[in-house]
């Protein structure tokens, strides 16, 4: 199992299970495992989300890497299913993502995807607290509000799946802002991933 190959994942899962049980919440409409997966992902005590998203990006580069080297298959599956189970709004959501220490490159009209699970907020102020070196304004149609399952409930978190594809609507280099709008879902490697020139600190790094 993934636990046998990944002690960090095992420890975080145990902590998330205790945290979930202490809150005495109902997981509906999710299964208990899906709810705990969201709690584990959003609890950054051991830095699991960084290791997980790095592994997701690497595994996305080829099928063999996913099969042989990706040791988060169960977490990836549970998070994907959780977002599918959570009902989305009739209209797409406008969310924000602030990044520290990364200068992203994007051109108007490009199609991109984050290539990882990406945490955003319904609140621009909350997003700015994570960084102002790049500020994304994102129209997501496949991201889901996970406030009821997140460790940080006050951050109005919306989680975007790695396979959602966006068009770059606007790039303001002076304000360091990039506007993205959802176009579709795609699980293949057709679209380029959003690139930055350094590894920075942000939700979901």
Image: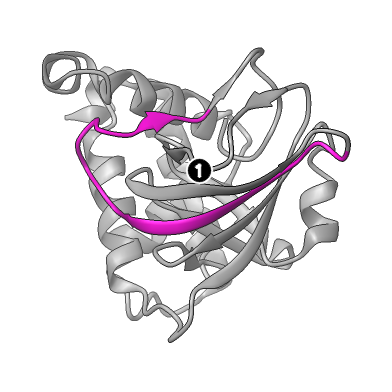
| Residue positioned most to the front | 109
Q: Residue at x 34, y 52 (%)?
A: 79
Judged left or right of residue 90, residue 174 is right
Give x and y (percent) for residue 55: 37, 22
Judged left or right of residue 65, residue 165 is right
Is residue 139 or residue 168 the one in the foreground? 168
> In the figure, residue 73 lies in which quadrant?
top left
Is residue 36 or residue 128 the one in the foreground? 128
Image quadrant for the N terminus?
top left
Q: Residue at x 39, y 74 (%)?
A: 27
Judged left or right of residue 134, residue 7 is left
Q: Secondary structure at mark 1?
A: loop
Give x and y (percent) for residue 68: 13, 14
Which stretch is magenta? 175-194
Give x and y (percent) for residue 83: 35, 63
**Residue 25 sits above or below residue 11 on the image:** below
């Amino acid at each position: 199992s993934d636990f046998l190959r990944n002690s960090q994942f095992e420890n975080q899962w145990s902590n998330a299970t205790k945290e979930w049980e202490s809150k005495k919440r109902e997981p509906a409409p999710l299964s208990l495992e899906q709810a705990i997966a969201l709690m584990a992902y959003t609890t950054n005590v051991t830095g699991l989300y960084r290791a997980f998203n790095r592994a997701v990006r690497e595994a996305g580069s080829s099928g063999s890497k996913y099969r042989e080297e990706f040791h988060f298959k169960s977490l990836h599956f549970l998070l994907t299913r959780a977002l599918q189970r959570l009902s989305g709004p009739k209209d797409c959501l406008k969310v924000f993502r602030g990044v520290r220490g990364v200068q992203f490159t994007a051109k108007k009209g490009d199609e991109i995807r984050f290539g990882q699970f990406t945490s955003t907020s319904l609140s621009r102020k909350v997003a700015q607290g994570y960084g102002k070196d790049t500020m994304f304004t994102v129209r997501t149609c496949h991201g889901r509000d996970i406030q009821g399952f997140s460790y940080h409930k006050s951050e109005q978190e919306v989680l975007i799946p790695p396979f959602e594809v966006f068009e770059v609507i606007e790039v303001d280099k002076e304000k360091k802002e990039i506007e993205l709008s959802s176009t579709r879902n795609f699980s293949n490697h057709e679209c380029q991933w959003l690139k930055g020139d350094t590894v920075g600190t942000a939700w979901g790094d």
